[in-house]
Image (cartoon, rainbow, N blue to C red):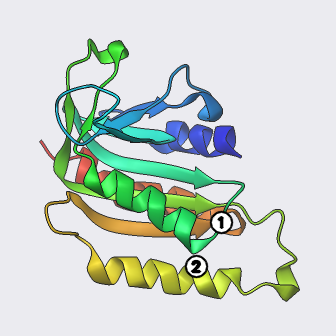
Amino acid sequence: MHETIGDIFEDFLPPHCSLIRDKACGGKQRIPLFCSAEKSRATEYCNVDLLVLKGNKIRIIVEIEESNVKPTQICGKFLTSALANYYIHNSKRNEPIEMDSSVAFIQVVDTSKLVKDKTSKFEQWKALEESINRITPLKNSRITSYRLLSTDELDKLVPLIKEMTVPRCDKN
């Protein structure tokens, strides 16, 4: 699923944006986010699955949840990303790449292990997305929009990519 979502982003990303993929998404690296411009184990908060960059700034963060789709896991991925400010990696000469003033966070949760007519997860995820959007942006966080999709909704991913990337990738 990670590679499929990475491919969808690659295929529909505007040409003036760049995509960084982690290994699970078909890339060659981890994608660490840090709370400061200093790269260290103490300042590394999380690793994400995909990053969309424009003008050397983070515009979109993507997280894909395949195994644990409970609210605590979903919120934990969102919060650690919201608390971070920089992507730092040797592929970018260890230069800190900061978040833009308005970053979108897209989370995709896997539904393949759910018994569709016996689960409340879809309703729970909708409520969770609404709850996160009520508190977004968090104080001092640059994540200003949040979307939660299930793998049953991958048909919505292409329009969402276009909706999220146009304002973030067409900006100067």
**Dots 1 and 2: beta carbons under 8 Å?**
yes
Query: In terms of image quadrants, where is residue 88?
Result: top left
Note whether residue 14 is visible. no
**Residue at image mark 1:** 69
Mark 2 residue element = helix
Give the residue drawn at x 51%, y 32%: 21
Kind of residue at disc 1: Val
**Residue at image mark 2:** 125
Position of 149 with respect to 79 (left or right) is right
Give the residue drawn at x 70%, y 54%: 66
Where residue 91 sits in the image (x, y, percent)? 36, 14
Q: Is 62 rendered above or below residue 7?
A: below
Q: Earlier in the sequence, mark 1 or mark 2?
A: 1
Assign the C terminus to one quadrant of the image: top left
Give the residue drawn at x 61%, y 35%: 25
Q: Nearer the viewer, residue 140 or 12?
A: 140
